[in-house]
Amino acid sequence: MRPSVTVRRRHRGLVLAASATALLAATLTGCGDGGGAALPQTPQTSQAQGAAPTELSTITPTPTKLPSVATTGSADAVPMPVGDIPGWHEIFTDDFTTDVPVGGFSGCQNDVTRICTGLPAPVAAKWWAYPDGWTDTSGKGTYMPSKTISIQNGTMHLHLYTADGVHMVAAPVPRLPNPVGTEGGQLYGRYAIRFMVAQPTSSYKLAWLLWPDTEDFPANGEIDFPEGELNADITAFMHRQNGVSQFDQDEYATTVPISSGWHTVITEWTPTACRFILDGTTIGTSAYRIPDTPMHWVIQSETNVDGDVSNSATGDIYIAWVAIYQPT
């Protein structure tokens, strides 16, 4: 099993967050080589809110096995949800009807506007991205939205690759209406996305996460789903509120490869639970020390933390739609 190791790098006043995988070096549930007491959980189980975690020495999460049909299908096999659903009010959708060529995600400003001036107005109203030149979590890659992000034929395409020795990666960020957080986030929400990774590689990874607007980690937690290298299986992590280290977390593993076709992933974050849903199956629910400060969602796609990055490797990620809700 691979626990999450969270690395932070500060750039011009903004902490860039990612949970990255590292080899299991301890036998506490969801822990790597240190951290606080571990909460033992397997997928589709939960711990009562406020209950004390149990510290064990030999337990690891049991991966969730999904039916093989979950890894097949097309982009439109699961259409974008439109409208409210029980318990949730839809506040953001995008199924990428406005094309943006490579180069459009340029002029991304790191200020209160959080806008990319190169985008057409309908897209600029919905998306920002980590600006060109920022270093990614591992320090081996460079965020270059102007070179890596495009929209065509109803999909957003993140093309991760190396040119002139630079490993170029991408981190688009949805711009929510009426955010309550200082960095565009909201307090609690439902985040749904349908995506496909075209080819497996260990050079690049997904670390799509909710990151606290306070930028106070580990105290204010972090929520990651999906996470893993592009040749690994899909995993989810919830870093707990009042965390004492980056390893103070719950982990939910699956046996579903990230690069196995189109997938729909949903994170439901409420005051009492954090639930992870993959292709209609709940792979894990946390109900202990849920993060309780505003967070913003980063579609962070970057170089691996452990190992080399091949100059010939590419990572192609396609996103069919995104839908975001707030609790009713």
Image: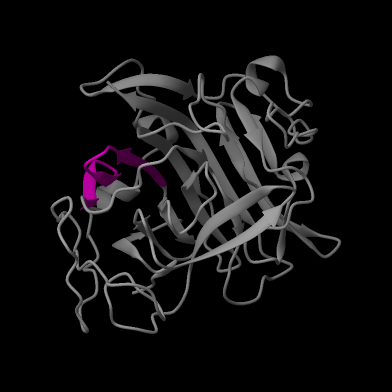
Which x, y percent locates residue 119? Answer: 73, 24
Q: Is residue 203 above or below residue 10?
A: below
Q: Nearer the viewer, residue 135 or 37?
A: 37
Name the residue at 74% across, 52% down: 134
Which x, y percent locates residue 176? Answer: 52, 25
Q: Nearer the viewer, residue 197 or 4?
A: 4
Q: Is residue 265 magenta?
A: yes
Which x, y percent locates residue 121? Answer: 70, 15
Name the residue at 61% across, 39% down: 172
Whether residue 230 is visible? no
Question: What scheme was used to colour the molecule?
Answer: one colour
Please identify the quarter of the rendering in which residue 328 is found.
top left
Name the residue at 44% across, 79% down: 23
Q: Nearer the viewer, residue 170 or 30?
A: 30
Please identify the quarter of the rendering in which residue 260 is found.
bottom left
Q: Is residue 120 above or below residue 213?
A: above
